[in-house]
Amino acid sequence: AQSVTQPDIHITVSEGASLELRCNYSYGATPYLFWYVQSPGQGLQLLLKYFSGDTLVQGIKGFEAEFKRSQSSFNLRKPSVHWSDAAEYFCAVAGGNQAGTALIFGKGTTLSVSS
Amino acid sequence: GAVVSQHPSRVICKSGTSVKIECRSLDFQATTMFWYRQFPKKSLMLMATSNEGSKATYEQGVEKDKFLINHASLTLSTLTVTSAHPEDSSFYICSARDVRGSYNEQFFGPGTRLTVL
């Protein structure tokens, strides 16, 4: 069965420092992968997605992610974190052979930013 | 394009009452919508897949008689929580599949926070 693992429950980084949030997926075929961010009490905002093509994907707010098939990973990165990046981050994979199939979410990583 | 709305954004109700949550695709038609549930500080879990003109498909463990889903038109799916109890308090998020693009991607609504007293 498909699954998504986010190994880090909570990460704290200093403002201005770089960030990497880990995501590993389990899926037999080519996955459709997503990263979402959720601020407290808010809905989901799509940061970026990978469907095909270039394995390094650029997203909004200066985020990027790299799809590594050999490692079944889709880690999210940002070179310099801002205090406003503090939020919950979810990695997700489409559960079927289309991007529009129901998503399977990881448990999320809470990002705190220290000054 | 590809905007999905939910109404209401927040609802508080008394135990035993029913609550209806609407999910609308504003600028596209969606034959398929999904309903997810998020417990506090938890991840999102798929509850059911809503198909226009047919019965919803529920995930294992989701009570279909408690969470009634109706997808009566190509732009509207509703989730009714019947006889709500405090344990039904949660954040409910819908998404709608847009088949206009190459990947039939789904887009999420802003969510509805339900509090049952």
Image (cartoon, grey):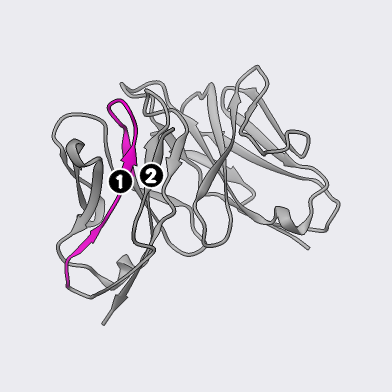
Q: Amino acid at mark 2?
A: Val
Which residue occupies 24% across, 44% down?
Answer: A73
Name the image quarter holding the N terminus of chain A: top left
Q: A74 and B117: which one is in front?
A: A74
Q: A65 and A85: which one is in front?
A: A65
In the image, B81: left or right of A55? right
Determine whether A68 is above or below A62 in the image.
above
* Percent position of residue A99, x then y: 37, 29
Q: Secondary structure at mark 1?
A: strand
Q: Amino acid at mark 1?
A: Asn
Chain for disc number 1? A
* Percent position of residue B41, x then y: 52, 62
Q: Are marks 2 and 1 in contact (CB under 8 Å)?
A: yes
In the image, B18: left or right of A39? right
Chain for disc number 2? A
Mark found first going from the N terminus, 2 or 1: 2
Mark 1 is surrounded, within 10 Å at the Cα level, by few (under 14), some (14 to 19) or many (20 or more) other residues, namely many
Name the image quarter holding the C terminus of chain A: bottom left
> Over which residues does the magenta segment extend?
A17-34
Which residue occupies 32% across, 27% down?
Answer: A28
Residue lying farthest bottom? A115
Q: Which mark is residue A79?
A: none
| Residue placed under numbered mark 1 in the picture | A24
* Percent position of residue A26, x then y: 34, 37
Q: Secondary structure at mark 2?
A: strand
A21 in the magenta segment: yes
Which residue occupies 34% across, 57% down?
Answer: A7
In the image, B26: left or right of B56? left
| Residue placed under numbered mark 2 in the picture | A4
Determine whether B7 is above or below A12 in the image.
above
Which residue occupies 64% across, 49% down?
Answer: B8
Residue lying farthest right? B16
